[in-house]
Image: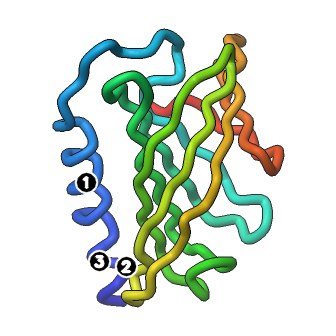
Amino acid sequence: MIRKLLLAPLFTLGLVLATAAPTSAAPTGDVIGSWTSVDPADGSQQSLLVTSFDTGFKLVYYDNDDTVECDSVALLATGAGIQASSTVSGSIRGMCFDGTRAGPFPVEFTYQAGPPETLTDGSGTVWTRSG
């Protein structure tokens, strides 16, 4: 129960840290922003924040109940990615909310302009823009 109460503040801290990163030579594309999806493996809620960073992207990923890497506790992971055409690829690593480390994991997202705008990850999960 305590872990669940800590999820929102820790995720918010991750978002603040990600958006505070300095940027230069920002990449083009409409992938920048907040995205959400439902993990088809376990029904958990996933969030992804993409911000510009140097010549690529900063990625902040959150899964509220990661059954694969974190034995059914939340996962917060960060990393970086680059864009080639409509695809963002990179790597993330993070921490499970039970204190174990997770990753690094390769990630890949393909942007579709829509409407609606979507990202599709390497496992076929469709993400939609949030907010």
Q: Kindly identify the residue that appears in the image at 67 percent across and 35 percent down.
A: 109
Q: Kindly identify the residue that appears in the image at 60 percent across and 88 percent down.
A: 71
In the displayed structure image, the side of residue 20 where residue 69 appears, left or right: right
In the displayed structure image, the side of residue 123 where residue 65 appears, left or right: left
Residue that carries the numbered disc 3 in the rendered image: 5
Quadrant for the C terminus in the image:
top left
Query: Residue 108: image x %, image y %?
Result: 68, 41
| 3D distance between C-alphas at marks 3 and 1 | 12 Å
Q: Mark number for residue 21?
A: none
Q: On screen, 11 above or below 109? A: below
Q: Kindly identify the residue that appears in the image at 62 percent across and 78 percent down.
A: 69
Three-letter amino acid code at disc 3?
Answer: Leu
Residue that carries the numbered disc 1 in the rendered image: 12
Three-letter amino acid code at disc 2?
Answer: Lys
Mark 1 Cα shell of 10 Å, populated few (<14), some (14-19), many (≥20): few
Residue that carries the numbered disc 2 in the rendered image: 4
Q: On screen, 98 above or below 67? A: below
Query: Residue 27: image x %, image y %?
Result: 44, 15
In contact (CB < 8 Å): disc 2 and disc 1? no
In contact (CB < 8 Å): disc 3 and disc 2? yes
- Does residue 114 appear in the picture of this structure? yes
Seen from the viewer's position, the closer of residues 45 and 86 is: 86
- Does residue 116 appear in the picture of this structure? no
Quadrant for the N terminus in the image:
bottom left
Label 1: element kind? helix
Seen from the viewer's position, the closer of residues 20 and 42 is: 20
Q: On screen, 37 above or below 6? A: above
Query: Residue 77: image x %, image y %?
Result: 44, 61
Label 2: element kind? helix
